[in-house]
Amino acid sequence: MLAALSGCGEVSIRTDMPSAYGAPAPGTSPLAPGETRLDPAISNALIRLAEDRRSLRRDLTKIEGTPVADILTVGSPIGYSLRNRFLNVGIPLGEAFAASTDPAFRAQLLELSRWDRDGESRASALIALAKTHDLKYLQVFNEALIHLDPGVRFGALEALVVFEHPREAMPLLAAASERDTEPLLRVYASAGLARMGDPAGLHRLRGFVNNPSWVVKAMAAKYLGELGTAEDYDLLRSRIPGEVGNDFVVAEFCVSALKLWPLKKASNDRK
């Protein structure tokens, strides 16, 4: 590619965001219909934080006896979410920029989702961007699906699930469910397909129940419990006696079978 460009003469590089993604023109910030203008003090502070975010990293080498050390030990889902939030400033910034359709904010959210160096912050921004349900951002998710960081790819898959455009999202999820290098991402993509009504998603989840990796098996069982059919009750129940290698897998098989029991019982009652 570099060789081809060298023969094209001088190439100017754009530093603004592509207009196809809806970035505002320099010096402008038009309001969407019915939107109230934001407090400039808050807007300016948030944009300054976004510009400085790469230097806003907490030093975790000397945290013993501090509140930061305490929050790292919290294991509940809310505690885990707070831990990520307070260690990666990009996560609250993404939430803030998603709260308004102001083009300046949307451009910052787009930058976070495409360029942030922290994988968790970038994944969070991708999900926030997806919640706008704007098709013009589909290419952003497509780009993230081939990122080297599996955390970014996971964020892109989750974004596609909440995007609410199944026709566009399903081919991308299907490709990831077959070809992503990380098995856990293939499981999640399969679950995303199942959520959108594609039978292929459930078929792939059933196959993952036989995977050598206990994490893959447990994750597949979890999603089968949420999305499966009466027949999947029998599949999970039949695996319980033979699963002697890992209690986590047994627990997921049991929990998911319990979730599917009402479907199985209804099926039996109809016979």
Image (spheres, rainbow, N blue to C red):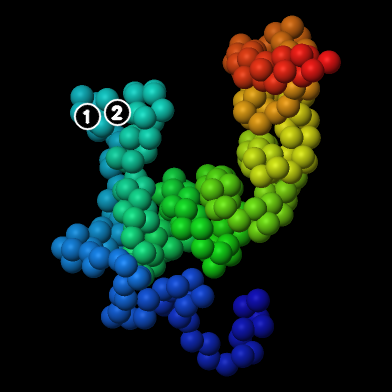
* Structural crowding at the residue carrying mark 2, measured as other residues with C-alpha within 10 Å and reported as few (<14), some (14–19) or many (≥20): some
Q: Position of residue 65 (x, y in %)?
A: 20, 24
Q: Nearer the viewer, residue 84 or 161?
A: 161
Residue type pointed to by label 1: Pro
Which of the numbered marks, if any, corresponds to residue 71? 2
SS class, disc 2: helix
Crowding at label 1, few (<14), some or many (≥20) Cα neighbours within 10 Å?
few
**Picture coordinates of residue 188 (x, y %)?**
63, 38
Judged left or right of residue 39, residue 134 is right
Residue 34, image x, y percentages: 32, 67
Q: Quadrant of residue 191?
A: top right
Query: In the rendered structure, which amino acid carries the disc numbered 2?
Result: Ile
Q: Are marks 2 and 1 in contact (CB under 8 Å)?
A: yes
Q: Secondary structure at mark 1?
A: helix
Q: Is residue 12 left or right of residue 233?
A: left
Which residue lies most toward the front here?
A: 270
In the depicted structure, whether residue 260 falls above or below residue 168? above
Residue under label 1, please give it: 67
Q: Residue at x 78, y 41 (%)?
A: 200
- Which residue: 64% across, 24% down? 225
Give the quarter of the figure containing the N terminus: bottom right
Which is nearer the eye, 123 or 182?
A: 123
Against 12, residue 133 (above or below) is: above
As drawn, is 193 to the left or to the right of 144?
A: right
Is residue 11 something that shows in the picture? Answer: yes
Where 202 sits versus 122, above or below? above
